Each structure stands twice: as C-alpha cells, then as structure tokens.
Amino acid sequence: MRVIISGAGIAGSTAAYFLATAGRHIDVTVLEKAPRLLAHGQNVDIEDQAIDVIKKMGLMEQVRRYNTTEEGTQFISPNGRPFAPFPVTGAGGPTSELEILRGDLALITYEVTKVLPNVHFRFGTTIKRVFSSKQDGDELDRVELSDGETESFDALVAADGQWSKTRSMCFPESAVSVVDMGVYAAYFTVPKTANDNKYWNLYQALDSKIIGTRPDPHGTTRAMFTCVPRNAAQKKSWEDIKRADRLTQEKHIAK
Ligand SMILES: *[C@@H]1O[C@H](CO)[C@@H](O)[C@H](O)[C@H]1NC(C)=O
C-alpha cells in the first residue's frame, strides 16, 4: 500500500508514523511545500487523546523537556497590575498541564518519523493534481507532483492545515469553507526581559485589541497581538498586509 501525505507538520508526521508502523507494509510519502521543516509557531496544549498519542510514540519524555513551563494565565490592568490569575492547577484554565510550542512538537514528531525506512519526506514539493479512477472522484489513482512526477497512491491524507490546497482539489468548494471570525492575529518572538514571568499575561486594550506574552523554553518570550477591525478601512488595511512582505507587516503591527 502506498500513502501520500500533504504537509510535514505535527499531523503529517504523526499520521506517517502510525501508518508506517501499523504492522502491514505501508510505504508513506510526506510532501512539504517549504524547502525544510518549518519549526515555527506558538503554544499547543497537549491534553486528552494527544497524551495517549504522544505516549504511544514514546515521546513523553522529549515533550516534557520542551514544556514551556507556563504556570498559568493572568490579565493585566491598564496600569500594569496583574489580576484574575488562572494557575495551571485550576481545572479548565487557559494554561494546560503541558504546553509546548508547535515548532518544537513538529520537530520532535518529524525526527522520530524520518528514521523509519518506509517513510520518505520530500521537501519543496507539493501536489499539483489529483486523479481519481472513478467518475465520482471517490477512488484515488494518481497524484501529479510539483516536481513533474506522476505517481500512483492508494490513499491521500491532507495534513496541510487550515488553508489546505489539497482539500480544495478533492472536495467541492462548498465543503471547504473557512469561517472568517474577523480577527487578525500576529505571533512573534521578543527578547526576554527581567520583568517577564512564567505567566501568560494578557492585556485587553480598547478598540478590540489584545496583547499577550508567554514564556518559552528557548530563553525568549513569545508575544501575540490580535485585533478586530472596527470599520471597512481598518479591515482593508489588515487584508492588504496579509499579502505584504514581512517588513511591511512588522511596521503595520508596530503602528
Ligand atoms: C509543565 O510546566 C508547568 C509549569 O512549571 C508545570 O505546572 C507542569 O506540571 C509541567 N508539565 C509536565 C507534564 O511536567
């Protein structure tokens, strides 16, 4: 059996791991658009079934090592005073018992999967076209890749995220909608200062803006900024910078 997975993120590597170790011979190809693994991103909660999955992959110790060690969530008043703390021991709080950065988890799951003999990662490669053998498009036949090759596969897994291009190739447009909640978010890494603590600090400003900082295990601080545009002109400026270069985006967010 041959399976092709689109996307070498947490989901792609994890799916490849379980298929490749499932007992019968399954040959897995994982495609990644980026030229190398994108170990970016911020907090992911590891809870419930995710704990079982991490344990089955034998990765609990490694994941623990990358615990962001966040102790809870608290709000910050306009004069800089913390209030309303939700420590990690409190049930149902925003900070989980185990928080890890998306990039760290992506790297951990990739490393344990890439050494399997029947898994092949191909970077800088995407799916160009999907051919199905039946009229209703139900049965996968061949997949044309961006490197010009066309190969046969028995199954295709779309693990290429919220804006998955693979989904759009396989399902009607009506089944692939993304609901716009009107929120724009920027995530970034900033130097750690002496004032930074082990909490997720959230400041809710006027004009539907939120600024937050959180600890990470790399000696830096993770920051986030979210905003809900309040009129059409503001919305347009955010839509424009979504497609702009990085410097323009940074300037816009700083402003
Ligand atoms: C992760 O770190 C936090 C903060 O130190 C701690 O409360 C939590 O128990 C740790 N999680 C695990 C699974 O060790």
Image (spheres, rainbow, N blue to C red):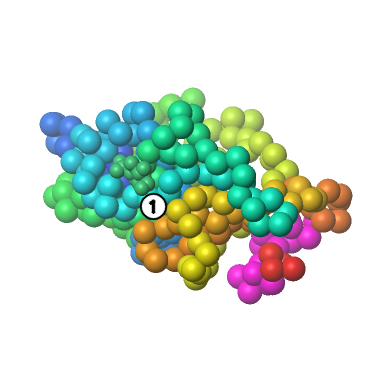
- Can residue 208 be found in the magenta stretch? no
Q: What residue sits 27% from the left and 52% below the top?
A: 65
Q: Is residue 149 depicted above or below 250 in this figure?
A: above
Q: Which residue is mark 1?
A: 68
Q: Is mark 1 within 8 Å of ligand 1?
A: yes
Percent position of residue 47, x then y: 38, 33
Percent position of residue 136, x then y: 49, 25
Q: Quadrant of ligand 1?
A: top left
Which region shows up in magenta?
Answer: 236-251
Residue 148 visible within the image: no
Q: Quadrant of residue 52?
A: top left
- Can residue 247 be found in the magenta stretch? yes
Q: What residue sits 50% from the left and 54% below the top?
A: 214
* Near-viewer residue (31 or 220): 220
**Badge 1 element:** loop
Q: Is residue 132 depicted above or below 80 in this figure?
A: above
Residue 224 visible within the image: yes
Q: Is residue 126 depicted above or below 22 in this figure?
A: below
* Image quarter (top left, top right, bottom left or bottom right) of the C terminus: bottom right
Question: As drawn, is 230 to the left or to the right of 170?
Answer: right
